[in-house]
Amino acid sequence: MHPYTKHHSESVSAWGEEKLLTAIRRWLGSASPRSPFGMGDDCAVLPASRGKQLITVDPVIYGRHFDDTVSPRAVGAKLLKRNLSDLAAMGGRPTTAVLALTLDPRVSRRWLEEFYRGLAASARHFNVALVGGDLAQTDRVIAASLTLLGQPAGPRIVTRTGSRPGDWIYVTGVLGGSLRTGHHFRFTPRLAEGAWLARHTAVRAMMDVSDGLAKDLHALTPRGAIPILHPDALPRRSGASLVESLSDGEDYELVFTVGTRSDHSAFVRSWHRAFPRTRLTCIGRFMRPGTEPSGSLKLAAFRGYEHLR
């Protein structure tokens, strides 16, 4: 659905800020609590937290993260799910979120209503309270940036650091072709899987695959080692090439490392009991340079998505 309208009477500018904010409250419904714990004040009031808190922020931008082929409801859901994927990669669970919206005055109110209803439905599904945000006008831009707060789902937070030479590399799901197949907005963030992995001490480091495995895996690589992958083991989405599975990005799967001394067979059996429908693949390991076997895949020849390049 095209987000702009040619008719001023159907645009957000025909309403103005105050009337639009009133409509947004209505569109969000129960996904946004009453002030001062939701929209209405300059700041939202959050309950005190006894433990550590997690925070992440991600946007969706028209022409970059979505186009006219993506429904506005799916755009709203994608905005929240992108952030949820970051939380999943640390073994967290979501609590609250705020949204900063930047709009061209020609944006259709119908498009915006569907966007907010999609966001609200996703927030209710994942038990996220939308507690406020900001609205601003610009020209020729539609962008929404969501800041998500969360807490550890268990006693442990998993970060990108912690891998060691010799550790095995695992990935959930399949990779590649996310834009062509629509996976980039139809995905389900791996919140349950991330929380489960964080409870297992054999898991040393973890992150989500958003910019392409070839780029993201470098963040997990320990000093003095390189990631060596088995090309035939890479779990590709139907029709995806090797290059696409490594470089496309927006897969929103989890890539993580498991200690070399762990009982891998027991780990995999336990995974399949917990998540029989979520594919798990060992794709390689971190090795010292010069010790890699012949026929293995090196990532130096591949590149993921890099902003501003």
Image (cartoon, rainbow, N blue to C red):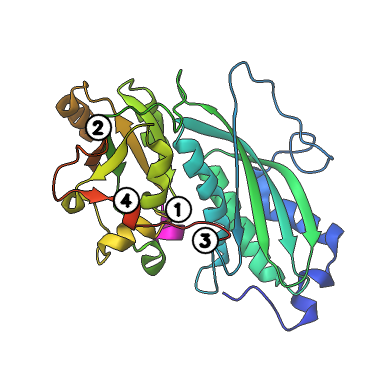
Report the residue marked by disc 1.
211
Circles 2, 4 touching at the beta carbon (< 8 Å): no
Viewer-proximal residue, 290 or 268?
A: 290
Q: Is residue 139 above or below residue 32?
A: below
Asked if residue 240 is among those painted magenta in the image, a careful observer would answer no
146 sits left or right of 44 in the view: left
Viewer-proximal residue, 150 or 265?
A: 265
Q: Which mark is residue 271?
A: 2
Q: CA distance from mark 3 to mark 2?
A: 30 Å
Magenta region: 183-190
Local SS, label 4: helix
Nearer the camera: disc 3 or disc 2: 2
Q: CA distance from mark 3 to mark 1?
A: 20 Å
Q: CA distance from mark 1 to mark 4?
A: 14 Å
Give the percent coordinates (x, y) of residue 43. Answer: 80, 37
Nearer the camera: disc 2 or disc 1: 1
Circles 3, 2 touching at the beta carbon (< 8 Å): no
Q: Is residue 9 visible?
A: yes
- Residue occupying the far bottom of the picture: 6
Which residue corresponds to the image point at 74% horizontal and 39% vertical from the top-left? 38
Report the residue marked by disc 4.
299
Mark 2 vs mark 1: which is more N-terminal?
Answer: 1
